[in-house]
Amino acid sequence: MVVDSFKFLPRSFRPLYEGRGPFPGEDAPVWAPFEKRLGESRIALLTSAGIYLKRSQPPFDVEREKTHPEWGDPSWRAIAASTVAAGIGVAHLHINDEDLLADPEIALPKRQLERLASEAGGVVGGAVAEHISVMGYQDRSLDDWRITTAPQLVAHLEGQGADGLILAPV
Amino acid sequence: MLARWIEAAGIPTVIVTMMPSVAEERRAPRIVGVEFPFGHPFGMPHDLGMQRRILELALRVLAGAAAFGTRVDLDVEWPVPVREAYRSWQPKEASPIVRKLLEARLASPPRGEVGP
């Protein structure tokens, strides 16, 4: 089956996404070979669902977005692999968060990843201790993500010993 | 784009996305497409089998893709009628940017459908 990328998108949104091509200066292939065996590798997850830890982290700044609609909070949160669903909040004004709050695994399957890693003859070696959450609605230039957030995420992933990253935009 | 910047720093990435054709246009290195409503890249809440299947596919593509631009689409139909799923992923209140665009359109009569 070939996935229809626009099946669930309002028609008026389609031109915002379709046929836009690469971002300026982002045409060239980028490639980091996956060199280890998967069964010996440590994997990290990244969600753009605006997930945060209710007890210890501020939510993504949706209040500012309400007064500056072209802006989205470019910061990020580290989400411990051990976090339970009840500890998770969602700050994202562009999706219905009911299913995410009921089961954050639909965007950040950290327990499923742990399960795969813990099985005998595991598919995957392990998971990082702290996964990554961002809020996917960003200003068009993506300057804050590119200049500030991305290098921080790379440093975090290196510190966590990640051999690969699964990104799941919502 | 995060995928490209992180990949460029030396960490292999795969993107699990509802919009794989857009990820291709944006030149993501490895892509898994899912035909699911937004907010649900790993499937239905509490459906461990579906979540596992997508995660395993993502891991296979991450570790096994031979070349830049590899795309694999998941062969799973969303188990909720399209109209219902189309409505239910959208926020109850229009987002600030959509509200702003709607207000701008009020000046000139809209044609066709208007977003959430």
Image: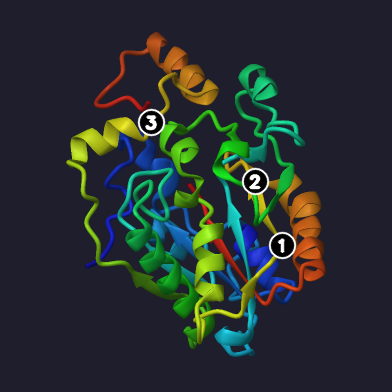
Residue at image point 40% right, 65% down: B52
Name the chain letter of the residue that bears numbered label 2: A
- Mark in front: 3 vs 1: 1
Name the chain letter of the residue that bears numbered label 1: A
Q: Residues within 10 Å of mark 2 (few under 14, many from 20)?
A: many
Q: Position of residue B81 (x, y in %)?
A: 17, 41
Q: Residues within 10 Å of mark 1 (few under 14, many from 20)?
A: some
Q: Quadrant of residue B9?
A: bottom right
Q: Is residue B63 above or below residue A18?
A: below
Q: Position of residue B79 (x, y in %)?
A: 21, 49
**Residue farthest to the front?**
A120
For the residues marked 3 and 1, what is the alpha-carbon distance in whole angstroms? 32 Å
Residue at image point 57% right, 34% down: A90
Q: Which numbered disc covers residue A134? A: 2
For the residues marked 3 and 2, what is the alpha-carbon distance in whole angstroms? 19 Å
Name the chain letter of the residue that bears numbered label 3: B
Q: Position of residue B8 (x, y in %)?
A: 70, 72
Task: Give the structural element (helix, strand or loop) at label 2.
Answer: strand
Task: Give the structural element (helix, strand or loop) at label 1.
Answer: loop
Mark 3 sits on what residue?
B90
Q: Is residue A135 above or below residue A109?
A: above
Tag 1 and tag 2, C-beta contact below 8 Å: no
Mark 1 sits on what residue?
A129
Residue at image point 53% right, 25% down: B97
Q: Could you tell whether A137 is left or right of A7 in the image?
A: right
